[in-house]
Amino acid sequence: MTLILGIETSCDETAAAVVENGETILSNVVASQIALHAPYGGVFPEVASRAHIEAIGPVVAEALEKARVPLDDIDAIAVTRGPGLAGSLLVGMNYAKGLALGADKPLVGVNHLEGHVYSLWLTERDEPVRFPVVCLIVSGGHSEIVAITDHGEYTLLGSTIDDAAGEAFDKVARLLGLGYPGGPAIERAARDGDPQAYTFPRAMLDEGYNFSFSGLKTAVLRAVQPPHDGKREPKGEGLTPDQLAPGVNVADVAASFQAAVVDVLVHKTVRAATEYGATEIWIAGGVSANQALRRAMTERSPIPVRTPPLSLCVDNAAMIASAGYFRYIQGYRDDLDLDIRPMWPLLSIKDAMRREGA
Ligand code: KG4
Ligand code: ZN
């Protein structure tokens, strides 16, 4: 039995978890900062790092306590190294290093995106995974399609050339005055709306596997903004409900926007899965909580679609512990002078070991 303590502080969740053999969650503690950032309509980096500093000690202690595992019994400490906010990553990284040094435990740095992929390893299934699998990773900072050919072996097929999918949800929600975080707010508003009320653009639908969502965001802005004199270019600031153009139905806009995002994500992922002979499609990351996305992918995919339970869609440390476990059992270790990587692409284990000289 191998026990990994996972620590995650890349954005606005302070999280710690204990996972057994990469697949069984013994504890999964998440302290969300949503209420702290809501007044700013997005994550305020300095506020985030300060909140992480306050929360990290109690959150780790609670994770060990809930798992009924003393630190001594932990085999390794897995910590998010990047990508993410530098000030936030630093808090988790330094805390993990302190624990690793003090308790004499190996340290394993984990890519946050790889963590999201491993949320699927924590998801119940009847039969073993057969590679290759194609995974759509959609979060506040990322939209990627990756082919997974083995544990820790990834080929990046496409990513966003501008806004991430979650970022588009957050920006459009702010524009419509729906609040933060935008994904759940748009999804809620869209329930009463007509997804065909507006025809929003589906950028680069049949071109490769990259995404672009900034044109969609602008199209939404133009649809809801009152007519102006043509001299001022509209800015992306939020409109209060009374500033929307007359006759705008927020539910219809939200539903039509969501349909456009979902359409592009599903279309490209299904095409990639077909081209790469995938046995399954996985969806991970915060946006994978979206029911419209889950439904459309399941309806339109010729192969099985797997999604994590809602609690594992958003940032958590169980997924970091699971990803860390699969690195750990392959012999991957990091030194105690490990640095954070705010911009860190998803690398296969072999490439990472080669590059890091590990
Ligand atoms: O993975 P995550 O918790 O953090 C990052 O790694 O970025 O993802 C957060 C993102 C936010 O942009 C949020 O608006 C989006 O996930 N999100 C959703 C939903 N729930 C969260 N987007 C669409 N529908 C949802 N239900
Ligand atoms: Zn994330």
Image: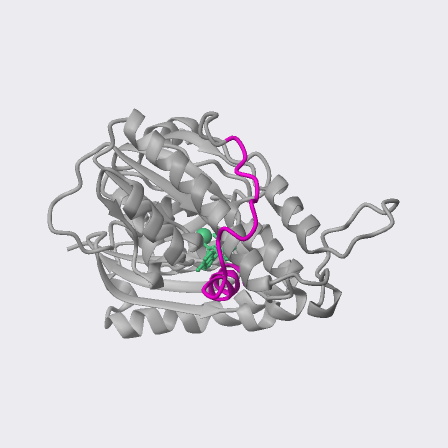
Question: In the shown orientation, is residue 329 left or right of residue 258?
Answer: left
Say which residue appears at 25% left-offset and 37% top-offset. 151
Numbered range of the magenta stretch: 181-204
Residue 297 visible to an observer of this rendering: yes
Name the one closer to the observer, 334 or 184: 184
| Quadrant housing the C terminus | top left
Seen in the picture, residue 151 relative to 40 is either above or below; the reply is above
In x, y percent, where is residue 305? Answer: 26, 45
In x, y percent, where is residue 307? Answer: 30, 52
Name the one closer to the observer, 266 or 196: 196
Residue 44, image quadrant:
bottom right
Name the one closer to the observer, 256 or 279: 256
In x, y percent, where is residue 69? Answer: 24, 68
Residue projecting furthest to the left: 127
In x, y percent, where is residue 205? Answer: 48, 32
Residue 250, image quadrant:
bottom right
Seen in the picture, residue 184 relative to 300 is either above or below; the reply is below
Residue 144, image quadrant:
top left
Residue 202 among those drawn in magenta: yes
Main SS of residues in magenta: loop
| Quadrant housing the N terminus | bottom left
Residue 52 among those drawn in magenta: no
Say which residue appears at 73% left-offset and 55% top-offset. 225
